[in-house]
Amino acid sequence: MKITQVERFVTAVPHIPSIEKSRPGDYKERPITIIRVHTDEGIVGIGEGGRGDLMEGVEQAWVGTDPLSLNLTAMGGAVAMACFDIVGKALGVPAHKLMGSKHFDRVPVGWWSPPLEPAEFAAMAEEGARLGYKTHKLKARPWNIVETVKLMTEVAGPDYGIIVDPNFSFGDLATSLRLARELEPYNIEAFEDPFQYLPGWHSYHHFRQHSIIPLAPHLGDPKVLMSAIRAEAADMFNMGGHVESLLIMAGMAEAAGLPVWLQAVGLGLGVSGAYGTHVHAVIRNATIPSDSLHFTRENDLIGGALTPKDGFVDVPDTPGLGVELDMAAVEKYRVG
């Protein structure tokens, strides 16, 4: 089998209104490229690039390659997705069979908010609870996080889980501990990257000794993850990377008795959402809702095939990725 053609569709799909208002026009500045990879056996696979990656030159780079010869679990990106789709279709198996053992028939996903004002966060929490999500991850900032969580809990209820992700903006250990104490009465499922842990893990270790709120570093390097485990600096992990790396890191975390969640894709569309769902299905300790956010766009370009129900997405069991492009939608949002 050989790749004979790679079609490229550059798309600009707006986020849902509650997210779009915080990042107006970002979808135009960072469009998403969809590819269709054709083979000489008539099998076509689909893939999705990262935000802002126009993937120019992808056809020249990959035409003539045999998808069956590739080590797909050590690859990432749109071509890897498309080849998982092709090989799965060629062998008559879903993509997750090519990645490992399936542990879930459906996987949890979380609701998500960009940086907003407290009342806006609360409105999104009310929306998330209404849609059935159990966990809500928010891009937090130290000056309004306590008021934000208070308002979110008032509208969504005390059982509505919140993951606080400041992207290191809490600044230091002392500030993070102070905010943690103020947030202890609420259902905070994790602090993700509250402050910078480099050059070592001693401050994260200290945080865990003085707070009941779980600490979750966001990592993509197995060696760094192992160092966090050895330093007793984490209660769970958010992980990114290709399949092979994710399986290694998840295995380390599982051996240490720690759960994980995945950010294999992020604010993408339906093709990457399908890929992320297959990856999630083979990671046994991925029990925390993932950051696969294909449902945060006004159109996922796969006809809503993986729309979450009550905070879960069904794992496709048909060959390949198990989804198809809605070409009418692709053309509607196509910009290149």
Image (cartoon, helix red, strand yellow):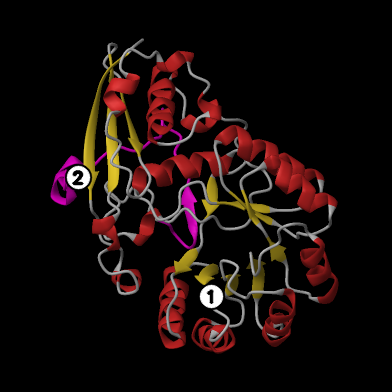
Q: Nearer the viewer, residue 269 or 201?
A: 201
Q: Is residue 257 visible?
A: no
Residue 197, compared with residue 155, is above or below; it is: above
Residue mark closest to the camera, 2 vs 1: 1
Q: Report the disc number at residue 29.
A: none
x and y percentages locating residue 52 in the rendered image: 32, 49
Residue under pointer 2? 330
The quadrant where residue 10 appears: top left
Within the magenta stretch, is there residue 66?
no
> How far apart are the two marked residues, 2 and 1, measured between alpha carbons?
33 Å
- In the rendered view, does 78 fall on the left or right side of 207? left
Please report the bounds of the magenta region as a residue range.
308-336
Q: x%, y% of residue 171? A: 64, 74
> Is 306 located above or below residue 143 in the figure?
above
Kind of residue at badge 1? Ala
Decide whether residue 315 is among the magenta residues: yes
Q: Residues within 10 Å of mark 1 (few under 14, many from 20)?
A: many
